[in-house]
Image: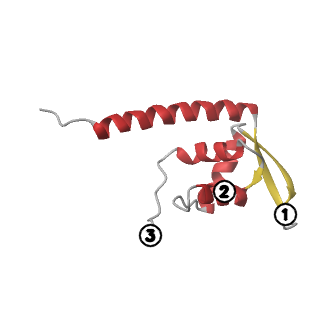
């Protein structure tokens, strides 16, 4: 398969992607980044400079909780998990995303105005 260009994240989607990623299990920051990249076949490249401020912001909002632990490689890392408030926010974000993509789909399949 030919290499595809990286896709730019639509403003505001990183939070939703992080919440969705952490909805399955707690992860440290680098694992979140790698999971998103792997799940998208490396079509979405998340910069650490965007990821860690987003994780911190979501923690401050109460959507994530964090505690220090050790990675499989024995390194000390901050592990993030979704809080009940974060799960509620994820549901709201997914609903909003579905409405948005449906609206864009309607626009893209619309006939030209006469």
Q: Quadrant of residue 41?
A: bottom right
Tell me the mark number nearer the camera, choosing from 1 and 3.
3
Q: Of the two numbered discs 2 and 3 on the same chain, state the one appearing first in sequence.
A: 3
- Mark 2 nearby-residue class (10 Å; few <14, some 14–19, many ≥20): some
Secondary structure of residue under mark 3: loop
Disc 1 secondary structure class = loop
Please tell me how crowded label 1 is: few (under 14), some (14-19), or many (20+) other residues with Cα within 10 Å.
Answer: few
Location of residue 87 in the rendering, given as x and y in whole percent from the top left corner: 69, 33
The residue to which callout 2 is attached is 35
Direction from residue 1 to residue 113 in the image, left or right: left
Return the mark for residue 2.
3
Q: How many marks?
A: 3
Q: CA distance from mark 1 to mark 2?
A: 15 Å
Q: Is residue 73 left or right of residue 22?
A: right
Label 1 or label 3, whichever comes before in sequence order = 3
Q: Quadrant of the C terminus?
A: top left
Q: Is residue 98 above or below residue 11?
A: above
Q: CA distance from mark 1 to mark 3?
A: 33 Å
Residue shown at 50%/36% (left/top)? 97
Depth order, front residue of 17/109: 109
Which of the labelled discs sits on residue 72, or is there none?
Answer: 1
| Residue at 59% across, 57% down | 50
Corner quadrant of residue 86? top right
Query: Badges 1 and 3: C-beta atoms under 8 Å apart?
Result: no
Q: Identify the coloring.
A: secondary structure
Furthest residue in direction front, as rendered: 1
């Amino acid at each position: 398969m030919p290499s595809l260009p990286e896709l730019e994240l639509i403003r505001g989607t990183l939070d939703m992607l992080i919440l969705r990623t952490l909805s399955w299990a707690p992860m440290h920051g680098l694992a979140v980044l790698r999971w998103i990249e792997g799940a998208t076949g490396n079509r979405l490249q998340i910069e650490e400079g965007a990821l860690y401020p987003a994780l911190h912001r979501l923690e401050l909002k109460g959507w994530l909780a964090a505690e220090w632990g050790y990675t499989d490689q024995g390194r000390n890392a901050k592990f993030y998990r979704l809080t009940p408030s974060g799960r509620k926010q994820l549901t709201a974000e997914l609903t909003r995303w579905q409405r948005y993509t449906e609206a864009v789909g309607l626009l893209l399949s619309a006939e030209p105005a006469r």
